[in-house]
Image (cartoon, rainbow, N blue to C red):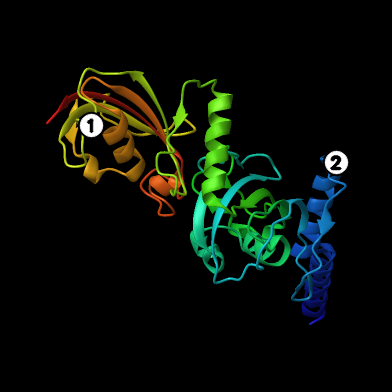
Amino acid sequence: MKQKIFTFLLITVVALSACKKLDNQPDIREFDKQQIDAYIKANGLNDFKADTTKDGTGTTGMYYKILMPGSGDTLKYSDKISLVYTLKTFDGKYVSSDTINNHMSEFLGHLTAANLPKGLQLAIHNLLQYKGASMRLLIPSRLAYGVNGFGSGSITNVNSRIAGNQSLDYYVHVIGNQNAYDDLVIKNYMTANNLTGFQKDSSDVNAKAHYWYKVTTPGTGTPGQINEFSTITTNYAGALLNGFVFDNSAATTATTLTPYNLIDGVEQALTKHAVTGTTISIIVPSALGYGPTAQTSIPANSVLRFEFTVTKVE
């Protein structure tokens, strides 16, 4: 009997000791706060503000800095917005900094369904608030991807998976005027790549968006030879501005196509500026491309670049 009582008391003491140790462990809010405080100190982010929005038993725990204020009506969850963003994890094992690839067009209330963090959705609604605005944002892990993380593969692989309990460092820009933004992207792209000789087609003064083009080989056909229903034989390639090639007939053999079936920017450029023998480079803003609808390998609201060599026109 004494042995049983002693054993029971020993188990009770061990259990109480275990509970005491667990009680001394930080909860997820405290853990995130410690990680964010350390990250802010390590990276000299002294001008960040704490989000004071109430969230359950406290505030969200997010920190932010408005880089560019926006204007207009405050954003509602029912508003469709166009986003450009970058992100990285605090541990540095996941970095996604390509703003050409990180485009999204979605209703603000649907961002989480599109696999973006809950914290980003809240911050756009509560803190950024306007189209045309941008900010840098630190999202605690509980408002990011939580204990399960995100992505596939081992957590030891760089850029394949966000580990569990990782807080995120986001840059996000909510585009106000898509056409103006695309035009600026094109100009910056041409400057960064030392592209000269491109002209902006402004033949339609009422158009809100304009493509840029450069004829590198004039061709020998008759001007106006190509119309929207012509059949042209061509070698061509289409790419994002980060160099990713999403379509490339030039790598195989020439193909035949009809301008009527092409995106508006390419159709207009070919019918206005190409003939038999022409080689032409075209940079197409998103409004004359696929617009806010993402395609396979082409994000929403993407600016596109095409190279065409026309070998035959029927």
Can you name the residue that lies furthest to the bottom here? 1
> Regarding mark 1 in the picture, which secondary structure is present there?
loop
Q: List x then y, in percent, for residue 114.
A: 49, 60
Which residue is pictured at 77% across the width and 55% down the height?
Answer: 64
Question: Which image quarter: residue 81?
Answer: bottom right
Of labels 2 and 1, earlier in sequence is 2
Q: List x then y, in percent, for residue 224.
A: 23, 31
Where 310 falls versus 212 (above or below)?
A: above
Q: Quadrant of the C terminus?
A: top left
Can you name the residue that lies furthest to the left here? 314
Amino acid at the residue labelled 1: Gly
Amino acid at the residue labelled 2: Gly
Which residue is pictured at 20% across the width and 23% down the height?
Answer: 276
Q: Which residue is mark 1?
A: 224
Q: List x then y, in percent, for residue 4.
A: 77, 78
Nearer to me, 174 or 277? 277
> Mark on residue 311?
none
Which residue is pictured at 63% across the width and 46% down the height?
Answer: 87
Q: Quadrant of the N terminus?
A: bottom right
Spatial CA distance of label 2 from label 1 is: 60 Å
Question: Which image quarter: residue 311?
Answer: top left
Q: List x then y, in percent, for residue 201.
A: 42, 35
Which residue is pictured at 30% across the width and 34% down the height?
Answer: 272
Callout in the foreground (2, 1): 1
Q: Which residue is mark 2?
A: 44
> Regarding mark 2 in the picture, which secondary structure is present there?
loop
